[in-house]
Structures are given as structure tokens and as C-alpha cells.
Image (cartoon, rainbow, N blue to C red):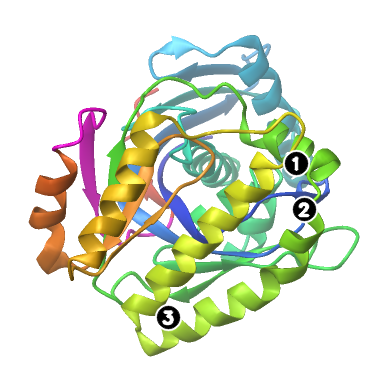
Amino acid sequence: MEAKTRAHSNIALIKYWGKRDRKLNLPAVGSVSLTLDALYTETSVKFGPDHTRDTIILDGKEASPRVQKRTSHFLDIIRKITDTNQRAFIRSSNNFPTAAGLASSASGFAALTHASLTALGATVTPREMSGIARQGSGSAARSIFGGFVEMHKGSKPDGADSVAVQLYAENHLDIRLLIVVISEEKKATGSTMGMIETEQTSPFYPAWVNTADTDIQEMKSALAAKDFARIGVLSEHSCLKMHATALAARPGILYWNKGTISVMHAVRDIRKAGTPVYFTIDAGPQVKVLCLPEYVEQVIDELNTIPEVRRIITSAPGPGVHLIQEPEL
């Protein structure tokens, strides 16, 4: 009745922003992502009749009431699927800042899903596990898989077809993603609230939804051809389009800060000078920079000259969710 799992964060190359059904957490658009080997969550789960409530220890401290409530609600979904009423003791930790725009909810809920189902002896396919993880966090559906992943928005009302699938394993394309950390503080506007405000108030939102399928198809073609330059161009375009949509909300949702903008300009200057390098940014201030392995040291040296850059994490494509032996509970 216990298991320990590691799941890796992922970064959307073609962005997900908006929901078609909030209760089932169904995305309004599909997405394409890259799972990262350098960023991960490790989660231990133990169910038992002696637990009177769900207890969540996050990064060594008892989770906030809001996180406790969200996690217990998700575990209720797991309990319904596995026909149990037992409560759980959960210990989870990230090797990167939580809630700072580095997709901690993606790796967190993917790890929680896998560990919970394993602890309860449930047999599910990766596709089914992806659909379950999505109900905790939309991007968690993608972290079930390694490498390059597509998330289907689906069309069924019950969300049965709103799942992720692996497009290519992590060895498909030898690229690097540099995570440029600008701030390790929690962001003021969470992703879910940002999406809701964008949907309700941004005049650009309908265009964002209507052009998403084209972006996905173009990215899938670029990945199939292993066309790094095209992958980079599409990633940067999707990033700027998502943030433009959020910026046009009322009030405007701004995840960037001074350092974010400095890094964006620096990446474009490096590219203009002849080095193929591209940026993407999720709902937070951190900038993720795509480049080829042979340019990593050069790009890091140039970006480290920016005063606001706190540190740079280098990541290659990473694996899907998997068990870790000897759970520590």
C-alpha cells in the first residue's frame, strides 16, 4: 500500500492556455511539450486504514490548507477509480522552485498519480494514467511520458479523449533546454486563475483557440523532420502569442519582469549574431532557451552577463514517470 515515484517537469513548445471544461480540467487547446531530465518531483504515497485524513508534506513542510484541499480532492478521484476509502500520507519534494513558472504542478500531479495508483495496486495504461493526471493539473498529463509529447484537447464531454501521447522518445533529437532562473518567488497569479481571467476578458482569446491546431500540426512536422530551427521559431511564436493573449486581459496578466525581458532580447541578439537559439516562457518569469548541445557553454556565458539571471539549469530531454525503489515513509 505504498510507492515512491519520480516524474519530470515538462515545458510546452506549443502552449496550452485555457480550459473548455473547468470541472473536468479539459484544455481548450492541444499542446506539444518536451519532458526535462533536470527538473523532477519525487513523491511517496502510503495508504492505510490508520490514517484519519490525507496528510501532505511538501518540500519538508506540511502543505498549506489550499494545497491540502486540492490534493485531497484529486485523491478522491483516485479513490473512486480504485474503490477504496483509505486516506494517504504523502511526502513530495521538487528539485526546483515550486509555483515559480517551472511546471511544478505538472511533475507533482504526474508523480502523485503514478504513486497513488501503484500503491493501491491499480492496473491502468499510460494513456489512462494521463487522463487521470490531467484532472489534477492539465500539464501533468504530459509528464506521464518522456521525450516529445502531444496533449489532445479532445472533444468528448466526459474528457475520455483528452489525454497525452508520446510523439517521440527522449533520444529522438539531441537538444538542450536552458532554464534561466530570474526569480524563485511564487508568482502572484497562478496559471488556473490566469487562464480564467484571459478567457473571460481578453479580446484575443478566440483567435488563440482558433489558431492552435495549425501550430500543433506545424510543430509535429518540424519534429518529424528534426528541423531544429523550425522547432525554435514555432516555440517562440507560440510563447509570444500566449502571453499576448494574457496581456490583453483586463487587468492585463504580466508574468514577465525586467530580467525576463532582458533575456528575451539577449537570445534574439545571440541568434542575430549567428547562433541558433530560441526562447519560450510559461506562466512565470523564467525563460527557457532552446539550443543545440554544441552551443550550450557559449549561450550560458552570454546570458550570465545579465544581472537579473540568478542561475541557469541545463536540461536534456527526460524520461516519463517511473517508480523509485525503497520508499522513505
| Image position of 27 with respect to 41: above or below | below
Q: Report the predominant secondary structure element of the magenta stretch.
A: loop
- Residue numbers of the magenta segment: 305-320
Please name which of the two marks, 3 or 1, marks the residue nearer to the observer.
1
**What residue would you read off at disc 1?**
198
Which residue corresponds to the image point at 33% horizontal and 69% vertical from the top-left?
A: 170
Q: CA distance from mark 3 to mark 1?
A: 29 Å
Label 1 or label 2, whichever comes before in sequence order: 1
> Residue 287 at x, y = what percent?
37, 44
Q: Are marks 1 and 2 in contact (CB under 8 Å)?
A: yes
The residue under the point 87% across, 66% down is 156
Residue that carries the numbered disc 2 in the rendered image: 205
Q: Is residue 22 visible?
A: no
For residue 131, side relative to residue 229 (left or right): right
Tell me the quadrant of the picture where the C terminus can be found.
top left
Which label sits on residue 223? 3
Q: Position of residue 272 (x, y in %)?
A: 25, 66
- Asked if disc 3 and disc 1 are in contact, CB closer than 8 Å, the reply is no
- Residue 1 is left or right of residue 291, and the answer is right
Mark 2 lies on a secondary structure that is: helix
